[in-house]
Amino acid sequence: MLTLLRAVIGRDLRLAMRRQADIVAAMFFFIIVVSLFPLGVGPEPDQLRRMAPGVLWVAALLATMLSLPRLFADDHRDGTLEQLALAPQPLGLIVLGKVIAHWLVAGLPLVVLAPVLGVQFDLAADALGVLVLSLLIGTPALSGIGAIGAALTLGVRGGGVLLSLLVLPLYIPVLIFGAGAVDATVSGLGPQAHLSLLGALALGGVFFAPWPTAAALRVALE
Amino acid sequence: MLEASNLECVRGERRLFTDLNFRLAGGEMLHLQGSNGSGKTSLLRMLCALTPAASGEIFWRGRAIAKLGEEFRSELCYLGHQNAIKEELTPLENLLSSAELAQETLAEDAAFDALAMVGLRGREDLACRYLSQGQKRRAALARLVNEKRALWVLDEPYVALDAAAVELVASLIGAHLQAGGLAVLTTHQAVAVPAGAVRELWLGDADARQRSQ
């Protein structure tokens, strides 16, 4: 089982490395969206500090969305998805591998970039720490939940827009608790409660989402 | 070993075939024929349990494949219309990763030999997007060289191949049948398989069969 997970993750990471433009594009999107806000709103530090968690989290959601349509589309187009569906292991396990690979490629870079971008908003050190932690816990949930949407819209014309309509509402809890954790730190309440709930969402997203995703993929392959 | 009973295929509003029955034993090959759109690919996908049949059942070793699931899939090798080749990877990486995903052990030397056998010597480390259509097909067919699974389901395996490669694939299928395996394939080319018994199955109306003969 673990060898299969490793094989799927290794394969997807290798493919991503051969196609770095996709990763870089999503990262630049994140950087630019976050950087536009201080320019648009003005340099008032109090206002920026208050906006920071929400802006960074919304930008992270959108950047994740950007890479979701390709999660299964390439494999579907070249016939690899059929082979994965015919592998002698549960398809859900293969999907879990793909979700983990997606997070490593699309989620982890956001976590690394976030503190640098947070400085633009004059966030204090402890708030920056919680921001990184909340993204680290929350972005796997984004990959997991997003996989369901990506599988449901597979092969649909104009699937990208449909995918956003389907997945963004499901991201709302992650957004609320993720941004809430940073807010709570800024206002001195402590982020523990928010982070725990975020952790629960992430566990649910990563370990339960692959099964409905696998079912949706089988329907798409029929 | 492989048996279909009263299969029916409905695509959209059209009923492609009904009451399709066949039985295939070890060492036998089923050659599916029929005009375009007669349901050959649909039947192959049913045999892989990718598409459910509108009615009827398929049995593998006496048990329905819908119930067997992973047990059946571990004995099935499917090669579809698409090559299932990643353009960004090299033929060697493609071959090794497909073996890995099927949970088979394939030594790197064996993979090199397989690629040399299908005529890709010297191109093992070239990304597949630089290969021609026929070479990509060869890279996909290299999987068959070391394939030990009992049931091969091949959709138009000879498409885009030159005469030498067609002969090679036919000999691979022959060796597989001789070892007691089963094969189901569609092709519009008349290719003789060197060993094993070949059974033919026509899909579609009788007129189309008359015209093509």
Image (spheres, rainbow, N blue to C red):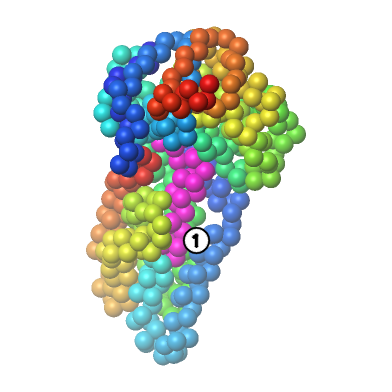
Residue A62: quarter of image: bottom left
Query: Looking at the picture, does residue A143 appear above or below residue B85?
Result: below
Whether residue A67 appears in magenta in the rendering, the answer is yes
Q: Indicate the position of residue B60 as horizontal and vertical percent values.
A: 35, 17
Q: Can see residue B73?
A: no
The residue under label 1 is which amino acid type?
Pro
- Front residue of A221 and B10: B10
Q: How many marks?
A: 1
- Front residue of A115 and B177: B177
Q: Residue at x 31, y 14 (%)?
A: B62
Q: Indicate the position of residue B26 as horizontal and vertical percent values.
A: 45, 10
Whether residue B161 appears in magenta in the rendering, the answer is no
Q: Quadrant of the C terminus of chain A?
A: top left
Residue extending farthest to the right is: B122
**What chain does badge 1 belong to?**
A
Q: Main secondary structure of the magenta part?
A: helix
Which residues make up the magenta segment? A63-86
Residue A48: quarter of image: bottom left
Q: Circle 1 sits in a helix, a strand or a loop, which is it?
A: helix
Q: Can see residue B192?
A: yes
- Front residue of B78 and A199: B78
